[in-house]
Image (cartoon, helix red, strand yellow):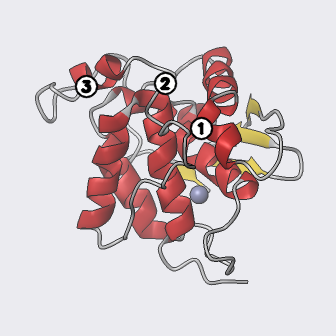
């Protein structure tokens, strides 16, 4: 077991990068499932996955606080307060760690650099290049090394065909800092935990 020393800082960096963006909007479970299906069917995922990509289910749990990836059932289980793209990307990055060959072969902490690289790449695959790059920048500010993973040769990068139009994200990040985004549910105050 490797000590997961970066966990809290990962949560903080993630919250900061998602603040005041559409990443924190609560969404219908069907839409979140569609996003997962789309990313799994992408050329990027299949080019990097160790085997043929297997389906991943998305469900809502009854927990007030906790969301998690369950590798044994291949389910992403979201708290009702975590039914948003920020939490989904976090859990989908854990799923990518399960499916993608580890870099260098050594065992990594749950929220170590392999996870963070894939977390950035998942943001790229869901909302486009800027969204992933913004997360990578905040990771850098927190002293957590991260970079986009190198796509396999002759395969497109994760931002080549994102699940959402990148303009969807980029338009929202131009909102005035601190201004509420419609339907936003504050997360930091609620103490939502994405495991
Ligand atoms: Zn986690």
Q: Secondary structure at mark 3?
A: helix
Closest to the camera, between mark 3 and mark 2, is 2
Residue 168, image x, y percentages: 33, 18
Q: Which residue is mark 2?
A: 161
Location of the C terminus by quadrant is bottom right
Q: Nearer the viewer, mark 1 or mark 3?
A: 1
Residue at image coords 69%, 77%:
105
User: Front-most of 77 and 128?
Assistant: 128
- Horizontally, residue 3 falls left or right of residue 101, namely left
- Residue 91 placement, left or right of 8: right
Judging depth in this view, the residue of 35 and 129 nearest the camera is 129
Instruction: Please tell me how crowded label 1 is: few (under 14), some (14-19), or many (20+) other residues with Cα within 10 Å.
Output: many
Q: What is the distance, in whole Å, between disc 3 and disc 2 at their CAs?
A: 16 Å
Dots 1 and 3: beta carbons under 8 Å? no
Q: Cα distance, mark 1 to mark 3?
A: 22 Å
Total tally of numbered discs in the picture:
3
Cα distance, mark 1 to mark 2?
Answer: 9 Å
Q: Position of residue 65 (x, y in %)?
A: 59, 47
Picture quadrant of residue 171: top left
The residue beneath circle 3 is 170
Residue 100 at x, y percent in the picture: 69, 55
Q: Residues within 10 Å of mark 2 (few under 14, many from 20)?
A: many
User: Of the residues under marks 1 and 2, which one precedes in the sequence?
Assistant: 1
The residue under the point 45% across, 39% down is 123
Give percent across and percent down for residue 150.
48, 54
- Residue 172 visible within the image: yes
Q: Residue at x 50, y 36 (%)?
A: 156
Q: Which mark is residue 44?
A: 1
């Amino acid at each position: 077991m490797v000590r997961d020393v970066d966990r809290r800082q990962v949560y903080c960096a993630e919250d900061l990068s998602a603040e005041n963006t559409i990443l924190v909007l609560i969404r219908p479970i069907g839409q979140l499932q569609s996003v997962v299906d789309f990313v799994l069917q992408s050329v990027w995922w299949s080019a990097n996955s160790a085997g043929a990509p297997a389906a991943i289910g998305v469900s809502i749990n009854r927990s007030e606080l906790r969301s998690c990836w369950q590798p044994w059932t291949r389910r992403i289980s979201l708290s009702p307060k975590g039914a948003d793209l920020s939490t989904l990307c976090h859990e989908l990055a854990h799923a990518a760690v399960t499916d993608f060959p580890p870099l260098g072969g050594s065992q990594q902490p749950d929220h170590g650099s392999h996870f963070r690289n894939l977390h950035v790449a998942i943001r790229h695959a869901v909302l486009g290049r800027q969204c992933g790059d913004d997360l990578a920048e905040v990771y850098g500010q927190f002293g957590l090394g991260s970079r986009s993973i190198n796509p396999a040769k002759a395969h497109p990068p994760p931002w080549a065909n994102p699940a959402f139009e990148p303009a969807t994200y980029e338009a929202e990040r131009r909102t005035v800092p601190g201004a509420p985004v419609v339907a936003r549910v504050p997360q930091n105050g609620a103490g939502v935990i994405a495991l």
